[in-house]
Amino acid sequence: MNSVIPVLDPASPQAESINNLFMQVLVISAIIFTIVSGLILVAIYRGRRKHTLPEQDFGSEKAEIAWMVGPVIIVIWLVAISAHLVITLNAYPPDTHDGNTNHSEIDLIVTGHQWWWEVEYPDSGVISANEIYIPVGKKLRVQISSADVIHSFWVAQLGQKIDAIPGRENYIWLEASKPGSYQGRCSEYCGAQHAWMNFKVYAVSQPEYEQWIASEKKDTSQPKLLTPLEAAGKQFFMQATCQQCHTVAGTTAKARIGPDLTHFARRKEIGAGVIENSPENLAVWLKDPQALKPGCKMPNFKLNDEHLKQLVAYLETLK
């Protein structure tokens, strides 16, 4: 387990810029605190030693100007570097000739839901949930919005946080300077399961990224040889209320209320980070989602053991 505080371990140029600004402010503040504290201690020591009132100084214009110039220069410097940082972090896409946003310049579309994240790759049409794959060293423009209440998208090691607001589109740069898995969270309280609205960003090499996109684009409508148990699970999934909330590409399930399940079995976690994705944990989740994530939008369907085994078997084929 990494013991380093994420915000102090930047893994992108944007996060490094934020960290550098923080360190400059911290150092300047520490110097000012040390100087002021030292002068106070000197004044206290001299006053106590003489047991008399210190010599009264009714002011000096030169001294006052000198004391004023220093702080003004520091403030101007901090304003300048802060403004430059804000400008460089601004990821708004260019406008088209008619004044509308050029959505062709958007690399990722992330939508916050209570309590999970929908991730769409516009160029490829790939849609996932709670897992974001990006190529190392490539700067991606991400559109952030919300489908219900205010959320906040934040990957501490990769840059600034930004609010996901219903009816509004915000934009952020997402980039990783080295391969790895980076923890993301919702940093705006959004309801009962705010603490379990997590996601992961996986930074991989360009060939690995292209391979992942290609695997996510696989045509799931092609016939697959299913076992009787898997076939029964698919039939139950389509006949029950599952397809009224979820999408499975190549089937009649096309709803966008819950996470897209097209390649569900390849994901590493269930319920936006609640438990690891395994057949055993999937059975526990389907048995009673409310027991693991109280208040989540998926109700307890009170599945019997037969239907539970069938659904687990079918969902495990979605790779």
Image (cartoon, rainbow, N blue to C red):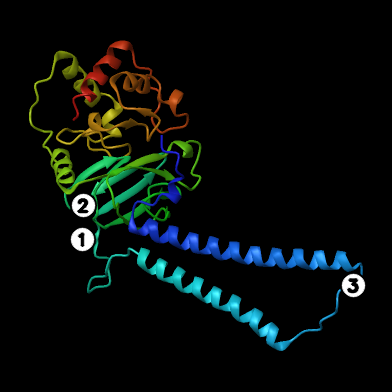
The answer to which quarter of the image holds residue 217 is: top left
Q: Earlier in the sequence, mark 1 or mark 2?
A: 1
User: Is residue 223 positioned above or below 306 on the image?
Assistant: below
Q: Which residue is mark 3?
A: 53
**The furthest residue to the top:** 305
Callout 2: helix, strand or loop? loop
Q: Nearer the viewer, mark 3 or mark 1?
A: 3
Please name whichever residue, 107 or 29, is drawn nearer the observer in this view of the structure: 29
Q: Which mark is residue 122?
A: 2
Quick one: quadrant of the N terminus? top left
Disc 1 + disc 2, Cβ < 8 Å: yes
Q: Specify few, some or many for label 2: CA neighbours under 10 Å numbering under 14, 14-19, or 20 or more.
A: some
Q: Earlier in the sequence, mark 3 or mark 2?
A: 3
Amino acid at circle 3: Leu
Residue 198 visible from this viewpoint: yes
Q: Specify few, some or many for label 3: CA neighbours under 10 Å numbering under 14, 14-19, or 20 or more.
A: few
The answer to which quarter of the image holds residue 307 is: top left
Please name whichever residue, 108 or 145, is drawn nearer the observer in this view of the structure: 108
**Percent position (x, y) of residue 284?**
37, 19
Callout 3: helix, strand or loop? loop
Q: Give the residue displayed 44% in from the left and 57% down from the top.
A: 19
Q: Give the residue displayed 23% in from the left and 25% down from the top.
A: 315
Q: Which residue is mark 1?
A: 104
